[in-house]
Image (cartoon, rainbow, N blue to C red):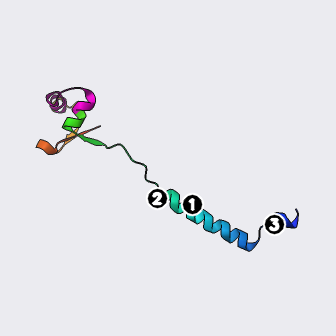
Amino acid sequence: MTPDQIATKADVQDLTAQIAKLQQLVSAIVTPREPEWLSLEKYAESKSVTIRTVNNWIANGKVKARGAGKLREVKI
């Protein structure tokens, strides 16, 4: 090993600072998640069916739902 291949204490500190900065940047990245719940309208649209059909599916236990009225949502 030659002297120019040895990292100095300053080199190590610089690299440590760069790694910390990269860790902050990576942790700041937010990956958008698909929603777990959709409104009746959006769910019906995604399945190309009517809201009445979705309500029938809910009543028959084919899909899970929460809420009531206009706030009702269907689990994807």
Say which residue label 3 marks: 6
Q: Is residue 67 above or below residue 52?
A: below
Which residue is depicted at the point 66% across and 65% down? 15
Q: Which amino acid does label 2 sit on?
A: Ala
Measured in 3D between alpha carbons, the distance from the residue under mark 1 to the one under mark 2, in whole angstroms, is 10 Å
Question: Chief secondary structure of the magenta span?
Answer: helix
The first of marks 3 and 1 along the sequence is 3
Q: Does the magenta stretch include residue 46?
A: yes
Which quadrant of the structure image shows residue 7?
bottom right
Measured in 3D between alpha carbons, the distance from the residue under mark 3 to the one under mark 1, in whole angstroms, is 24 Å
Q: Give the range drawn in magenta.
A: 44-58
Q: In this view, does 57 lie above or below 16?
A: above
Say which residue label 2 marks: 28
Q: Is mark 2 on a helix, strand or loop?
A: helix
Q: Is residue 16 magenta?
A: no
Q: Which amino acid does label 1 sit on?
A: Leu
Q: Are marks 3 and 1 in contact (CB under 8 Å)?
A: no
Q: Can residue 68 be seen in this view?
A: no
Quadrant containing the N terminus in the rendered view: bottom right
Which residue is depicted at the point 19% across and 29% down? 57
